[in-house]
Image: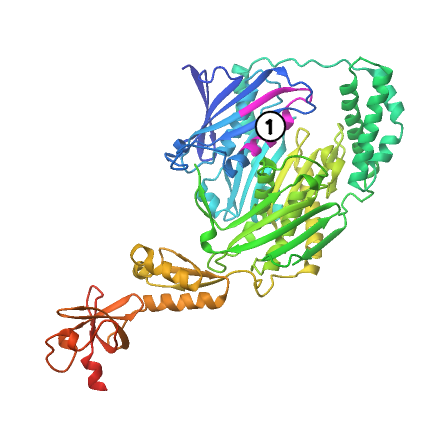
Amino acid sequence: MTGETFKLKLGERELKVELSNLAEQASGSCFVQYGNTLVLTTAVVSQYNREGADFFPLTVEYEERYYAAGKILGSRYIRRESRPSDEAIITARLIDRAIRPRFPEKLKREVQIVATCLSWDRENDPDIIGLIGASVALSNSEIPWSGPLGVVRVGQVEEKFILNPTYEQREKSNLDLVFAGVEENSDVLINMIEGEGQEVSEEIIVKAIEFAQPHLKELIDFQKEIFKRFGKAKLLLEEPPADLELEKEIKKFLGDKLEKTLYQPNKIDRMDEVNALKDDLVYYVEEKYPGDGKGQFVKDFFEKEIERLAHENIIKLEKRPDARKLDELRPIDCQAGLLPRTHGSGLFCRGQTKALSILTLGAPGDVRLLEGMEIIGKKRFMHHYNFPPYCAGEVRPIRGPGRREIGHGMLAEKALIPLIPNSDEFPYTIRIVTEILSSNGSTSMASVSSASLALMDAGVPIKRAAAGIALGLMQDPKGNYKILTDIQGPEDHHGDMDFKIAGTREGVTAIQMDVKIKGVNKKILKEALAQGKKARLEILDKIKKVIEKPRPELSPFAPRILTLQINPEKIREVIGPGGKVINAIIEECGVSIDIEDTGKVFITAEKEEAAKKAVAWIKNITREVKVGEIFHGKITRILNFGAFAEILPGQEGLIHISQLAPYRVNKVEDVVKVGQIVPVKVISIDEQGRINLSLKEVEKKL
């Protein structure tokens, strides 16, 4: 192995980048270490263009390895990693979103980035380390890429910002933000944001950006030094020669047709007419120039014309396809409780974007068990997002959730988690499923609003309602720009930014930003945050008119959970030998029972009466018997020296032969028989908890 290591003090720890020849067949590779978390990142480019591709074929994979955490996990019949966890998919998407805009538009060779976590120290998250690795590997490869970029995580504890906080510090932090940035004229532009917060203000987010920028610059400069020594010459891309005459012909053919088809509010009509116009254009050119293979050129130029038209009309005229003002929301309609048998439901419609969220309440035992490299635990709140083909007017196979569905579902989940009551206050497991019924811009943010409606409809005591909004950007080469509220259709596809902001009246709970340009400056981000807050408050006003706060009662179809606290030493008595006792309670009462090590017991039943019956049963089992109490005990066993009587379910005491009667008893069976009910008095309890009973003491009183 040959290699060289570069070091940078970043925050409280040292960042190490090692270039070696271990993955020598990759186009570029590096090991990046922060603390004792180490990630190998590789970049590989195909030797050939992907034929017929009208998009850049980039794939990013993040590989968790159980050995990195010193664990042997997975099914006992497999004991190895299988499909990526949701957390791994989110990390892969994080890397993808930051690096994708930096590739040249004309690159049609397949590029694959693989980040593999080889060592994890339980303190430093591999996600930003993998992104730094991707930047280094791409910068030092022959792959055309406009890097490097810097990436940092920012937390805040006691009003003090922390650079790259550990997991422990993140638990105490009121925000968790990841910023990626690139350099432009000695300034740092932000090109990706991912994060969540405990209803933090927009002003704090701006300050977090200001805090991050110098560290991003530091990382960029650090990588530049590496590139100067080890960078490779980039592949030269073949630029198709410009056909100015054909461009003039296309523009003449289009005339004002493109603007007329593009600028209409209905997505279906717009897309049908735009596609029909494109087909007419391709047919016209191919008829005029048969066999010249100009079809792809025409399609590419057509898309550029749409992009040019969208930018010019918005920047110069503030003209949007559906004639809205720049900061105007589409018409909003909300409903709660529209499904008859679910535990909670909410419908949120914003223009042609329609999201239906359905909530289900379950027992504490219905939690999702997490088993991964970084996380082993339980998850009691889940939000899942479905994007069926019909919502976009498409026909395609329906398979399991893809990366987009997982990413959007997780973003909405982050937005709602700060509002969910803790398990002591509300012990239910909560699952929300959002079905996108119709898609025309920012379905993920619509799912935040519909899920919020479903939570309140179900009677979940959330702190307050949440809503989400997506903002866009149109910017020209001179730096002139306009920020758009509630982007849709061509504004999203041909725009320069997708900035999603979710939160409450109190502040932001989730944030995500991607760009198609180099990056955006602090001024644009500050304006977007302010414009997003205005829109969010407008949406929350609409939600308030439908349902102001959580319903006071749960749905009659939701299960009922009763809790009680027992002595932890009594847990084994509730369970019984081989689970005999607890299974009897479950079967006879029709309930489910979850018991924590602390002695907290949760009884879940469809009807409250069944849960109360189980509670009474468990209370009897775990009741602390006191000396002097009198019970009607059932004789369960007879021995030579006395008889055992069950005084409470699962609790027996001994009636010694001397305590059976006020006279000498020669044979126990002369006084009592198995199954007989007799009054007994507790006369003592020894140090081991054994109960001694007396029959004659009761008879004296009688």
Residue at horizontal 70 percent and vertical 47 percent from the top: 354
Q: Is 326 or 665 nearer to us in this picture? A: 665
> Which amino acid, mark 1?
Ile
**Residue 529: percent from left, percent from top:** 67, 44
Q: Quadrant of residue 335?
A: bottom right
Front in this rendered view, residue 87 or 285: 285
Q: How many numbered discs? A: 1
Q: Is residue 118 visible?
A: yes
The answer to whether residue 315 of the structure is visible from this angle is no
Q: Compared to 440, does 305 lie above or below?
A: above
Image location (x, y in percent) of residue 262: 82, 35
Please report the bounds of the magenta region as a residue range: 92-113
Using a 10 Å C-alpha cutoff, classify the residue at mark 1 as few (fewer than 14 neighbours), some (14 to 19) or many (20 or more): many
Apparent side of residue 576 relative to residue 81 in the rendered image (left or right): left
- Quadrant of residue 107 within the rendered picture: top right
Q: Is residue 646 above or below residue 351?
A: below
Q: Secondary structure at mark 1?
A: helix
**Residue at mark 1:** 99
